[in-house]
Amino acid sequence: LKSQQDPVVYADKVECLIEMQDLEDKGYIDLYYGDESGFSLNCVIPYCWQFKDEPVLILPQRGKTLNAFGLMRSTGDAVKMSTKEGTINAAFVIESIHNFANSLTKVTVLILDNARIHHAKLFQSFIRIWEDKGLYIFYLPAYSPHLNRIERLWKESKYRWIPPSAYVDLTTLGQALDGIWTKFGTEYKINFSASKG
């Protein structure tokens, strides 16, 4: 992906991210990263250990997926999550962001990637409305998923935090995810203090 980046745009956007992070560190703004992700019953199998003669068994299941649109604070200590079965469309993302915009207490920047859904005509029609509520959209440079901090949340959830017992059906998977989102920032943490961007 790096070869497809525009180096000038990339450098400019990274500089903006650093400046916005500094503004948040000083308490002037809130900074959130947004993204969509899917969770299926065909689970991710990480490397793990087990007791001798004690098999770990998770049966893969094809079928429905639980999709999420998440908004994570840049500091990794707060998350707002909207989930649904089936495909996420622009209307769902707009509703999630609109509810978020209505709860703001200070100027907030929401950082998004360049997914088609984030550039849909319907989505674009709400940007001015959100700005009037103090929410500003900032798009990451193209082909730069590593700059979207919420990608760490998806990775930690899928590879570390969802217990094997959650993969019985979509209900148990949803309950496990709700538990993670509810305890995110206390029991489940991501530390970004060592990086700027």
Image (cartoon, helix red, strand yellow):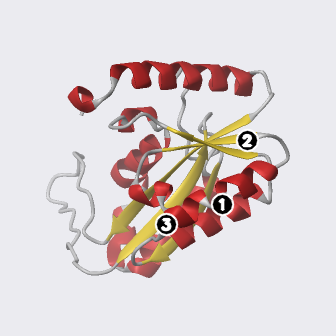
Residue of label 3: 176
List x then y, in percent, for residue 30.
73, 37
- Write the residue at 65% across / 46% down: 78
* Sequence-first disc among 3 and 2: 2
Disc sitting over residue 108 in the figure: 2
* Residue 69 position in % (x across, y down): 51, 61
Residue at image point 80% right, 57% down: 103
In this rendering, the answer to whether 49 lies above or below 29 is: below
Report how far apart the C-alphas of labels 1 and 3 lie in the structure.
Answer: 32 Å
Q: How many numbered discs, if any?
A: 3
Give the mark nearest the N terminus, 1 or 3. Answer: 1
Q: CA distance from mark 3 to mark 2?
A: 29 Å
**Closer to viewer: mark 1 or mark 3:** 1
Q: Between residue 5 and residue 167, name the one nearer to us.
A: 5
Q: Is residue 12 above or below residue 106?
A: above
The quarter of the picture where residue 167 lies is bottom left
Label 3 is placed on what type of residue?
A: Ala
Q: Residue at x 42, y 33 (%)?
A: 141
Res 99 visible? yes
Left or right position of 136 against 94: right
Please provide percent x and percent y for residue 166. Answer: 40, 69
Q: What mark, if any, has residue 126 been given in the picture? A: 1
Which type of secondary structure does the marked residue at label 1 adopt? loop
